[in-house]
């Protein structure tokens, strides 16, 4: 047994005396230490406040550390760094031409993280897609739509498009536009509207509900109604407001305006 | 005025129920096997499902006791005067404003911890701040703005805050509404069962800006209501009055 161990040790010692083996061992140690340091820093960075920044910082830092460790490990193996960097430069140009979209998305992702038009869990609307932001990555942003679908939007699109953030501010205005047939209906309707707005518990008392007369048309008097709700209650308030308004108008005998044409026979 | 305080222990055997009017609401407790059910219902309007709020509490204990405690609201209250007051430069006034209450429900010892809270009546929310972008969500309250304590109509479902307003500006003040930092206030009861909070003093400087908002430590003084007993501590203890000073221009 002791002879076997002694043989193994002498074999290992002989192997370690070879310069290539020692360099390989050093390279392996450097790489392992680099990976461990990158992992440790990434974990420490994920304790920050903003999720998007944490993601970006951890990726950049761990990428740099792994890159340096890898290059150092390769140099220990006898590969010249200048050759590697030269090859990387050529490779970067080739990849840059081949992957312009990817690079554009990457840079757009950096801009989005710095500009911060939205954050995780915000509800945004982009090109007729509405959903909750679930992932902000360097290349794309992923939304969960109301019908529970995952939509991936390239960051380049987000940077170019008009993005509506529906939950950025704590309160939102609910707008309803309709037509009222006659002046008599308008009087009754005004009373109904303010009663309905007051009776919905989730409608905010202030900013005050408002009734705006927008103009006149063949359908009657064009009205815009506005009430306010918290962003979280917006959909519930909009639905409840329209439901109660419809019922109250029916009960109060107020008709919506319909298009009218006077036919004159000549 | 309700005949007796609604708070304290309530004992019910399994299968029994208990109903108690509280101001413009009523509270019902039902004790089923392994379950308590508490419901508050507005009695000021025709009762519908929309005016009732129910809390179900599941427990392994067969204890027949539940403890009720009154609590002040969890958000500030913005009280708007039905008719605004004018206050001359250098003058001041004292108004009495009601804040809504909720009932906190605790299981009997040894658990003895609050398991839920029910508002005694539904209070609309309102936004208080200089713009829809900056401000905070509060409860909205309408008030006649009584200027004499003996004129206050007490309901069991609200607590009265004494608000002292001092106009230190050089212009007459149109006093339309006031934000009461209810989560920072304690709840007190007097010998007749009326509920009070700490007194709040609001000092208005030039341009209608709240220069200072001060909460009097201890029970409200100068009320001539005898000794007051503290029923509940403030929900929040940290000083967040900077907000009121920053947004006080809306007063």
Image (cartoon, grey):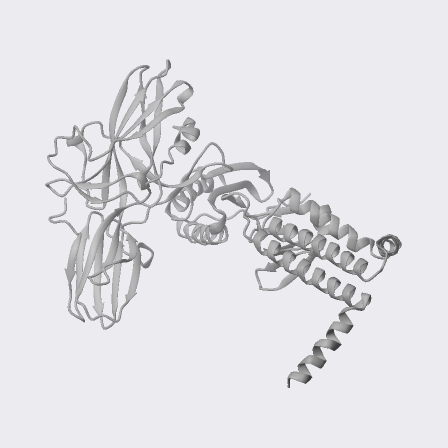
**Quadrant in the picture for residue A94:** bottom right
Who's the residue at 76% across and 69% down the image? A16
Q: Pinpoint residue A2: horizontal percent, then vertical percent.
A: 64, 83
Q: Is residue A31 above or below residue B210?
A: below
Task: Report whether residue B98 is seen.
Answer: yes
Horizontal placement of B97 versus A131: left or right?
left
Is there any visible trace of residue A127 in the rendered image?
no
Question: Could you say which quadrant of the image residue A14 lies in?
Answer: bottom right
How many marks the image carries: the answer is 0
In the rendered structure, the answer to whether residue A145 lies left or right of residue B27 reads right
Which x, y percent locates residue A101? 80, 54
Name the quadrant containing residue B16: bottom left
Task: Name the residue located 34 percent from the left edge and 17 percent from the top edge.
Answer: B168
Across and down, in percent, residue B56 comes to 30, 64
Which residue: 64% across, 45% down? A263
Q: Is residue B92 left or right of residue A61?
A: left
For residue A254, above or below residue B199 = below
Is B151 in front, or is B210? B210
**In the image, is residue A47 above or below residue B144?**
below
- Could you tell me which residue is drawn at 74 percent across and 66 percent down? A25
Towards the viewer: A22 or B121: A22
B193 relative position to A106: left or right: left
The image shows residue B134 at horizontal and vertical percentages of: 49, 36
């Amino acid at each position: 047994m002791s002879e076997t161990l002694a043989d193994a040790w002498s074999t290992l010692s002989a192997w370690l005396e070879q310069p290539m083996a020692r360099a390989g061992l050093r390279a392996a140690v450097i790489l392992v230490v680099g990976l461990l340091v990158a992992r440790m820093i990434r974990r420490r960075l994920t304790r920050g406040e903003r999720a998007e920044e944490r993601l970006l910082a951890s990726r950049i830092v761990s990428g740099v550390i792994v890159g340096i460790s890898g290059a150092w490990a390769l140099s220990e193996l006898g590969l010249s760094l200048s050759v590697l960097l030269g090859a990387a430069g050529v490779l970067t140009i080739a990849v840059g031409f081949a992957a312009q979209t990817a690079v554009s998305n990457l840079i757009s992702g950096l801009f989005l993280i710095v500009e911060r038009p939205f954050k995780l869990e915000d509800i945004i609307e982009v090109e007729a897609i509405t959903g909750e932001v679930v992932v902000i990555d360097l290349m794309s942003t992923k939304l969960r739509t109301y019908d529970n679908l995952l939509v991936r939007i390239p960051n380049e699109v987000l940077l170019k498009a008009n993005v509506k953030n529906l939950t950025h501010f704590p309160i939102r205005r609910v707008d309803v536009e309709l037509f009222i047939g006659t002046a008599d209906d308008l009087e009754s309707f005004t009373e109904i509207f303010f009663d309905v707005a007051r009776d919905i518990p989730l409608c905010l008392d202030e900013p005050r509900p408002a009734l705006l007369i927008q103009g006149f048309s063949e359908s009657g008097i064009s009205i815009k109604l506005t009430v306010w709700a918290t962003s979280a209650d917006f959909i519930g308030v909009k639905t409840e407001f329209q439901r109660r308004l419809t019922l109250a108008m029916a009960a109060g005998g107020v008709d919506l305006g319909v298009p009218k044409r006077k036919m004159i026979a000549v | 005025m309700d005949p007796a305080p609604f708070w304290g222990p309530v004992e019910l055997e399994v299968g029994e129920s208990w109903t108690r009017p509280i101001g413009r609401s009523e509270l019902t407790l039902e004790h089923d096997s392994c379950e308590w059910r508490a419901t508050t219902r507005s009695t000021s309007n025709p009762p519908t499902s929309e005016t009732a709020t129910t809390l179900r509490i599941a427990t392994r204990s067969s204890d027949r006791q539940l403890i009720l405690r009154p609590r002040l609201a969890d958000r500030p209250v913005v009280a708007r005067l039905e008719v605004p007051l004018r206050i001359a430069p250098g003058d001041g006034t004292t108004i009495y404003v009601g804040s809504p209450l909720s009932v906190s429900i605790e299981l009997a010892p040894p658990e003895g911890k609050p398991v839920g809270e029910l508002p005694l009546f539904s209070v609309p929310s309102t936004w208080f701040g200089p713009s829809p972008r900056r401000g905070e969500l509060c409860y909205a309250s309408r008030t006649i703005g009584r200027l004499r304590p003996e004129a206050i109509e007490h309901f069991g479902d609200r607590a009265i805050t004494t608000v002292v307003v001092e106009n230190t500006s050089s212009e007459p003040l149109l006093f339309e509404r006031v934000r009461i930092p209810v989560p920072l206030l304690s709840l007190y009861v007097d010998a007749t069962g009326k509920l009070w909070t700490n007194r709040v003093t609001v000092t208005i400087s030039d341009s209608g800006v709240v220069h200072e908002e001060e909460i009097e430590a201890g029970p409200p003084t100068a009320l001539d209501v005898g000794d007051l007993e503290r029923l509940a501590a403030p929900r929040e203890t940290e000083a967040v009055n900077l907000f009121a000073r920053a947004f006080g221009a809306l007063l």
